[in-house]
Amino acid sequence: MTNLDQFESIFKSADKAVYAYDRPTFERVLVVTDLIEADARDIAGRVRSFLAVIDKAGTRWDTLSGDAFDNVQVLLERIEDLKPDLIVTYRHLHSKAWQWPYSLGEYLDVMTQATSVPVLALPHPDAQRALPHSVKDTDRVMAITNHLTGDNRLVNMALAFTQPNGTCWLTHVESQPVFERYMDAISKISAIDTETARETLSEQLLKEPRDFIAACQAAINTQGLPVKIEEVVTMGRRVDEYEELIAKREIDLLVLHTKDDDQLAMHGAAYALAVELRGIPLLML
């Protein structure tokens, strides 16, 4: 390595992502169901209690019952008319497919991609899959991603939904299979020492999100937010890793990105998590 390369590496390692705290607000919340009006109001009441942390004096709560829409286009039009800051719904609206754990249903699939509004998906009310601690409060919130560094929006959303004196987990799970694929390629390049590359690359991949979480913690302390931050930075198989993390910590709400700038559909890792993790609410950004 030349002196210039060494200087460039030192310079880049010192260039760390900056976290900026900016609490999002939710002036209008829309609860979407496929139930009759009376049952829809009951669900909406429970949702409002569950999301008490974002329910301010001026928050407007709207509810769509099952007879308010009968296809995706009508639902999108109602969303456009009401202009919510947050949509709350559940899987498989107007469908019995909740009996099989293979999809989210066409309405939820489209809502997460065709609107810019965050969508909070609850366990289906008839599926009886909700975990015992689910849909009660939000004192245990987890933000999950494979690229946490610099993701201010994900962190701010997770903090906004964490109750005062609650715990917010900031997690970064690096894909073990992807890492091993790159290491296999590196092992075939004679100019690179494989063991040194394995050690230093894995260390750098995990150091960056840890540094960003430390920056988040410092900013949160400065703001005086009554939220405890916990760090989870690891390498593993993402779906399995997250299922274990969620079960062990009894997470109330999972916050994750579901949009991909390079494709129309939800990106693969997010979709796998959304389909698999049916027992707790998911806030999909």
Image (cartoon, rainbow, N blue to C red):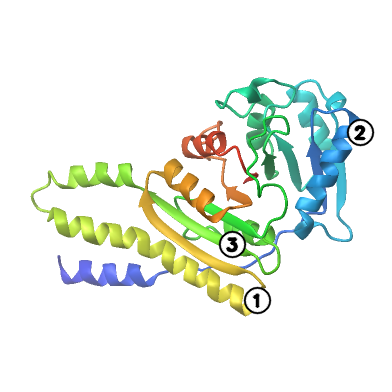
Q: Residue type at mark 2: give it.
A: Ala
Q: Residue type at mark 1: give it.
A: Gln
- In percent of the image, x 29 and y 47: which residue is there? 179
Q: Is residue 53 above or below residue 119?
A: below
Quadrant position of residue 20: bottom right
Near mark 3 (Cα within 10 A), the count class, few <14, some 14-19 or many ≥20, is many
Closer to the eye: label 1 or 3 = 3
Q: Residue furthest right?
A: 38
Q: Is residue 130 above or below residue 217?
A: above
Residue toward you, 111 or 77: 111
Which circle's residue, 3 or 2, is located before the other in the chain? 2
Residue toward you, 210 or 137: 137
The total number of labels drawn is: 3
Q: Is residue 6 above or below residue 233?
A: below
Q: Residue type at mark 3: give it.
A: Cys
Say the numbered circle drawn on residue 38. 2
| Mark 3 element type | strand
Say the numbered circle drawn on residue 231. none
- Asked if residue 257 shows in the view, the reply is yes
Closer to the eye: label 1 or 2 = 2
Residue matched to label 1: 223
Q: Is residue 163 above or below residue 126?
A: below
Residue toward you, 51 or 261: 51
- Asked if residue 17 shows in the view, the reply is no
In-image side of 278 versus 30 (left or right): left
User: Where residue 34 appears, x then y in whole percent?
Assistant: 80, 27
The CA span between labels 1 and 3 is 15 Å
The CA span between labels 3 and 2 is 34 Å
